[in-house]
């Protein structure tokens, strides 16, 4: 798709959403321009309107059924009240539409220590989230995967059986998707966005997922965990954290395989899954030594 066609498509999609919601239109005013932003689960746009600039999140058909929008809204608002998330301006849980202010992001990368402190405050200060992370459900191989896709996951499925993780201990309000794209660096420090997969979870899940998705080396991981502990977080034992890393990658791999089977063309999801599977199997080898 050409750049011009992409802009026209973005404008049409955002215009349709705004025109269909009077409350949303009252906030934004007339749509002037729209630009597509990166996003795997949703269609995300930065929009210029008569009343200012905003970020408009619209759902993708391939992922719409995976999200509990009511829980997402409740968790986002709870996190925003504690100053660890960007508060929305408009939410329609039925349509999956979310409007946020367009912040002027700083070019600085979020340091491991800054992210560790942010996650520590999330886990310590937010009393509770709707919903809960259920690893048994998340690790079920989707029925719509064909035999070829199932075979890609089979080696990791065996490794998971050998290295289970404990999920019956302390649960904390967790973001559950701490990838770099879901942390914004602002003038006042980092803040979290995108609470679609949030819920109550073992602390190790957010910690393991963040370390993996941000590609921290040993020094980065140490700084991240030390800042998390200083903010009041309870750091798990090293072996437990390693085991959770393997499970994080397994869930990500299954999600990606499901997206590939559903026809989501936002990314090469097969390659995405293969990278996660390979990394998880490498962790399994370490745990077996």
Image (spheres, rainbow, N blue to C red):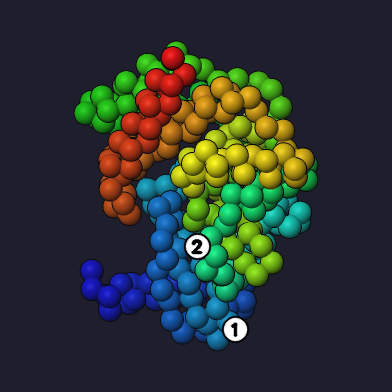
Q: Is residue 262 left or right of residue 118?
A: left
Q: Residue at x 68, y 32 (%)?
A: 235
- Circle 2 SS class: strand
Question: What is the quadrant of residue 23 in the picture?
Answer: bottom right
Dot 2 corresponds to which residue? 57
Q: Which mark is residue 238?
A: none
Q: Earlier in the sequence, mark 2 or mark 1?
A: 1
Q: Is residue 151 left or right of residue 98?
A: left
Expressed as whole percent of the image width and height from the top left, the position of residue 2 reads 23, 73
Dot 1 corresponds to which residue? 51
Expressed as whole percent of the image width and height from the top left, the position of residue 88 reads 64, 63
Q: In the picture shown, does residue 180 fall above or below 33?
A: above
Q: In the picture shown, does residue 76 fall above or below 283?
A: below
Judging depth in this view, the residue of 61 and 228 nearest the camera is 228
Instruction: For residue 126, say whether it is visible.
Output: no
Q: Is residue 236 left or right of residue 247?
A: right
Q: Residue at x 40, y 29 (%)?
A: 280
The C terminus sits in image quarter: top left
Residue extending furthest toward the front:
219
Instruction: For residue 155, say whether it is visible.
Output: yes
Q: Residues within 10 Å of mark 2 (few under 14, many from 20)?
A: many
Q: Residue at x 51, y 24 (%)?
A: 243
Q: Residue at x 44, y 72 (%)?
A: 14
Judging depth in this view, the residue of 57 and 108 nearest the camera is 108
Expressed as whole percent of the image width and height from the top left, the position of residue 92 reads 58, 59
- Circle 1 SS class: loop
């Amino acid at each position: 798709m050409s750049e011009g066609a992409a802009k026209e498509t973005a404008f049409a999609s955002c215009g349709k959403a705004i025109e269909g919601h009077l409350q949303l239109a009252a906030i934004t005013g007339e749509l002037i321009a729209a630009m597509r932003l990166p996003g795997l689960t949703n269609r995300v746009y930065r929009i210029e309107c008569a009343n200012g600039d905003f970020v408009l999140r619209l759902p993708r058909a391939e992922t719409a059924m995976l999200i509990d929008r009511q829980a997402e809204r409740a968790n986002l608002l709870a996190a925003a009240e504690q100053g660890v998330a960007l508060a929305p301006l408009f939410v329609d849980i039925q349509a999956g539409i979310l409007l946020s202010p367009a912040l002027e992001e700083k070019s600085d990368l979020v340091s491991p220590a800054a992210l560790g402190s942010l996650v520590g405050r999330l886990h310590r200060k937010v009393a509770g989230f709707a919903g809960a992370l259920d690893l048994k459900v998340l690790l079920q191989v989707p029925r719509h995967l064909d035999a070829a896709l199932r075979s890609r996951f089979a080696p990791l499925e065996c490794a998971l059986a050998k290295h289970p993780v404990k999920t019956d201990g302390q649960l904390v309000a967790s973001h559950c998707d701490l990838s770099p794209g879901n942390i914004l660096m602002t003038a006042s420090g980092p803040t979290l966005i995108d609470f679609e997969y949030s819920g109550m979870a073992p602390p190790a899940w957010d910690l393991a997922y963040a370390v993996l998705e941000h590609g921290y080396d040993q020094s980065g991981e140490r700084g991240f965990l030390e800042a998390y502990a200083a903010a009041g977080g309870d750091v798990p034992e090293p072996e437990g954290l390693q085991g959770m890393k393997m499970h994080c990658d397994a869930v990500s791999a299954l999600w990606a395989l499901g997206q590939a089977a559903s026809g989501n063309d936002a990314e090469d999801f097969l390659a995405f899954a293969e990278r996660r599977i390979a990394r998880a199997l490498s962790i399994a080898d370490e745990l077996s030594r």
